[in-house]
Amino acid sequence: MAYDTASPSEPLITDWDATKATAFGREPLVLRHTLHERPMFDDAGLEQVLDRFPREKLGVFTMGEDPVDWRSWRRGAAGSLTGSQLLEAAKTGRIWLNLRAVNAHLPDYADLSDEMFRDLEANAPGLRTFKRDVGLLISSANAQVFYHLDMPLVALWQLRGEKRMYVYPAAAPFVAPDQLERIATRDMPEQLPFDPAWDARAEVFTMKPGDMVTWPQNAPHRIENGPMLNVSLSVEFMTPQALVRANVLYANAVLRRRLGTTPHLQAGMGPSTVAKLGLARAAKALRREPERSAPPHSFKLDATRPGELLPV
């Protein structure tokens, strides 16, 4: 069963104003939305989407409790569990279910993606988006996402439960230039070493149902769930400006690695930026991108023992 989305005339975000519209994508920002009121995100709706989503695409993960120990993030196997059994595992265990690019697989989520981006583009001046990836996240009480950054822009829409979001500046010491460049070229994972002392410089948001948080491109961040099931939409996208930044970072990685220079990340479309865009395009054409294979399954779920992580 697919769910109908709301009429395009009904605004999703309820508190746009000129200041927030201008700040969107440029600084950490909280907006209010109405998506959490929709039945597609109640238990029955989540069970159905878990049944309809391609099982081979479903990410099942667990993690430790130390925010520094990102290597405790492990991948598991859902097997043949039904949507109802998967949701029960999330309610009783310590797992993170990731339905990545659900808008590419299910028509109702494709419609929802179109609706969300219509609202954003209608209210944020000059915003033009592409490479849209809407991910549905269903996660257990007290689960966490470790310190990392994303190459696209991201907006996190909270639907159920509460979580704490920490957003850090996209600059040293929170991320070094060479780390940012190597993430752009896919030569290192998005996870980064984390120092808890950096929390003093973070912007912290306690997210409740109906909150949406967005932040500047490449800003490191991490998440801690409250003591209840959490459901969110993680919405990734590119804009022309974001794509330029990603390609300049790619070119900077080439300059640093091959010529030993210390390149800078400049803004705007001056001659240096145009030259770097050409360099990035040429370097990509000549290079076979490193493949990121998924880690092996280290645990499995079992319908008869909900919440337990069993050996593979």
Image: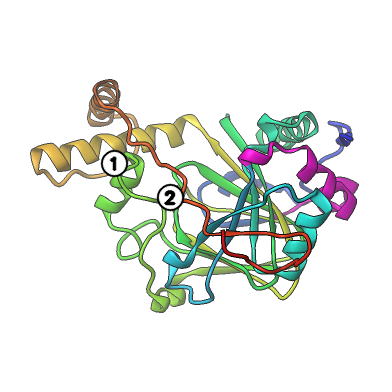
Residue 277 is one of the magenta-drawn residues: no
Which secondary structure class fits the magenta region best? helix
Quarter of the figure with residue 162: bottom right
| Element under disc 2 | loop
- Disc number for residue 266: 1
Q: Earlier in the sequence, mark 1 or mark 2?
A: 2
Image coords of residue 73 (percent x, y):
49, 62
Image coords of residue 35 (percent x, y):
81, 48
| Element under disc 1 | loop
What residue type is disc 2 on? Asn
Q: Nearer the viewer, residue 55 or 123?
A: 55
Q: Is residue 195 left or right of residue 29?
A: left
What residue type is disc 1 on? Gln
Q: Nearer the viewer, mark 1 or mark 2?
A: 2
- Residue 206 vs 132, above or below: the answer is below
Quarter of the figure with residue 102: top right
Q: Can residue 237 be seen in this view?
A: yes
Distance between the alpha carbons at the discs numbered 1 and 2? 15 Å
User: Which segment is the magenta one?
Assistant: 31-57
Q: Is residue 118 left or right of residue 171?
A: right
- Residue 263 vs 199, above or below: the answer is above
Q: Is residue 310 left or right of residue 255?
A: right
Residue 41 is one of the magenta-drawn residues: yes
Q: Which residue is drawn at 86% across and 45% down?
A: 40
Q: Residue at x 87, y 53 (%)?
A: 42
* Residue pointed to by mark 2: 218
- Disc number for residue 73: none
